[in-house]
Image (spheres, rainbow, N blue to C red):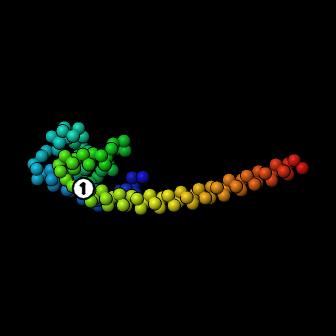
Amino acid sequence: MPDDVLKKENSEIFKSIGKKISQKRKQKRRKIQGISKKLNISKVFLDLIEEGDFLKMPRHVPRLGFVKSYAKYLNVDISSEFSKMNSITSDIDKSKSKSEFIFYKNFKSLIVFLFFFISCLIILLLF
């Protein structure tokens, strides 16, 4: 799924998750450096999670996995946020699959037309 769609639709959810995690970390009086070493996740990535800017992480990084690990480590329940996010992305996927079906239907018509056209051309060339 394109990042720009995720960013637009989920930015408030990302901010909410980051705020929950940040508050819990501060409540437990934990330092990001220590958590970074414990989870083996870069301090920069943990900062981005707390800010709600997950998508600033490189694409090759398992962003949501890092978020889940961080939340689990601090015992933060983010299941409701992930449910909201999944419902948004499933709605986007449904609209995407409809457009793929339309493309497939049009592509099939194009193939039939090309087959008919080439058949007519061959018949004309033979006579």
Q: In this view, does 31 lie above or below 16?
A: above
- In the rendered image, residue 75, in percent from the top left (x then y), is placed at 17, 51
The residue under the point 40% across, 59% down is 90
The residue under the point 85% across, 48% down is 125
Task: Evaluate whether residue 34 shows in this view.
Answer: yes
The residue under the point 66% across, 58% down is 109
User: What amino acid does circle 1 point to?
Assistant: Ile
Image position of 119 (left or right of 30): right
- In the rendered image, residue 48, in percent from the top left (x then y), is placed at 26, 49
Task: Evaluate whether residue 15 shows in this view.
Answer: no
Q: Is mark 1 on a helix, strand or loop?
A: loop
The residue under the point 18% across, 38% down is 38
Image position of 84 (left or right of 94): left
Tell me which corner region of the image, top left, top right, bottom left or bottom right, holds residue 82: bottom left
| Residue at mark 1 | 78
Task: Please tell me which residue lies in front, 75 or 118.
Answer: 75
- In the rendered image, residue 9, in percent from the top left (x then y), is placed at 36, 60
Local crowd size for mark 1, using a 10 Å CA cut-off: few (<14), some (14–19), many (≥20): some
